[in-house]
Amino acid sequence: MSATILDGKEIAADIRSEIKSEVEELKQKGITPGLTVVLVGDNPASQSYVRAKARACEEVGIYSEVIRKPSTITQQELLDQIADLNENPNIHGILVQLPLPDHISERAVIDAIRVEKDVDGFHPLNVGNLVIGNGAMLPCTPYGIIEMIKRTGTEIAGKNAVVVGRSNIVGKPVSMLLLHENATVSICHSRTRDLKEMTRQADILVVAAGREGMVGKEHIKPGAIVIDVGVNRTAEGKLTGDVRFDEAREVASYITPVPGGVGPMTITMLLKNTLTAAKQIESV
Ligand code: GUN
């Protein structure tokens, strides 16, 4: 079997065109959704993500601004900046690009973002609402992953889903979303005893461990849907995932490539969250 490739760019383009029409409708009511991305320091990967986010906003008609701050900024200065954005009526979404420099507490910064403007879905209230299934602002990567799985036409209910990785950004929230879709969910991590035995039970396998090529053919149940969230750079500077794509596609039914899989979906769901935030804040 050779797996169907889940083309994140194609799926993202469909969703972005839906978002674009909704943004136009809002603009006719005098509301322009607005997103601010705050970038601290000069991490090259963060700079490239932030550029991509700004470009995507422009494409669908969302107003966006990037606030760049030096890595010497104090935590209080950053908190003051967030307080301003919380009050800014033109801004519906606030995203502080992570990671932050060591002298700044990421937790304190995330906690300071007004919950309704937390388009990353990282605020503890949004995380709590996600767990209890209470209409939370969903974190973008997990949200994008669920959309991709749904668009295969596969019924998630009753399936075995295995998530490799337990990060707050991907592993934990995607597990929760899969559970809400009535999958039977297992979360594996660095202390899991027999990873292969676990992953081979997966009808849906989500790999978000950040370890280049750690999942191969031997980990995959024939016919499984494989979602690769890894973004790693090889020694030659090539972008690659956590899954060995060429061998995995021989056994999977669907598989996401890296790049061009989950990545474009993450940014798309950020646009969607910004639109949702604008509608909620403006009560339309
Ligand atoms: N850094 C890497 N991924 C993300 C993300 O999804 N949101 C934010 N704010 N920072 C990140």
Image (tube, rainbow, N blue to C red):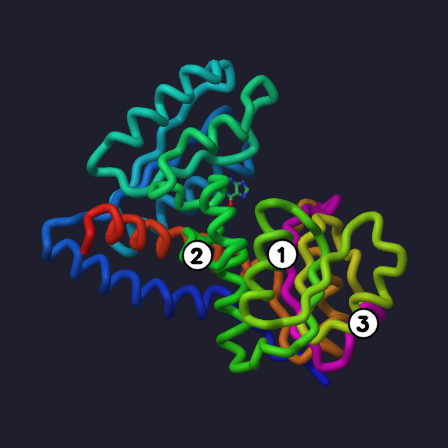
Mark whose residue sits in front, 2 or 1:
2
The residue that label 3 is drawn on is 200
Q: Quadrant of the N terminus?
A: bottom right
How far apart in space, not on screen, are marks 3 and 2 (Cα)? 32 Å
The residue that label 1 is drawn on is 229
Residue 159 sits in which quadrant? bottom right
Residue 218 sits in which quadrant? bottom right
- What residue is drawn where x is 72% and y is 47%? 234
Q: Is residue 84 left or right of residue 241?
A: left
- Earlier along the polypeptide chain: callout 2 or callout 1? 2
Q: Which of the pair 149/109 is nearer the observer?
A: 109
Q: What secondary structure is found at the residue carrying circle 3?
A: loop
Q: Amino acid at mark 2?
A: Asn
Q: Which of the pair 258/188 is nearer the observer?
A: 188
Q: Is residue 52 left or right of residue 145?
A: left
Q: Was residue 225 drawn as part of the magenta stretch in this picture?
A: yes
- What residue is drawn where x is 50% and y is 54%? 130
- Earlier along the polypeptide chain: callout 3 or callout 2? 2
Question: Badge 3: few (under 14), some or many (20 or more) residues near its Cα, within 10 Å?
Answer: some
How far apart in space, not on screen, are marks 2 and 1 (Cα)? 25 Å
Q: What secondary structure is found at the residue carrying circle 1?
A: loop
- What residue is drawn where x is 26% and y is 61%? 20
Question: Badge 2: few (under 14), some or many (20 or more) residues near its Cα, within 10 Å?
Answer: few
Is the residue indicated by label 2 positioned so its CB lies within 8 Å of ligand 1? Answer: no
Q: Amino acid at mark 3?
A: Arg
Mark whose residue sits in front, 1 or 3:
3
The residue that label 2 is drawn on is 134
Question: Badge 1: few (under 14), some or many (20 or more) residues near its Cα, within 10 Å?
Answer: many
Highlighted magenta segment, given as a residue range: 217-236
Residue 114 screen position, x and y as percent: 36, 35
View extreme (right): residue: 193
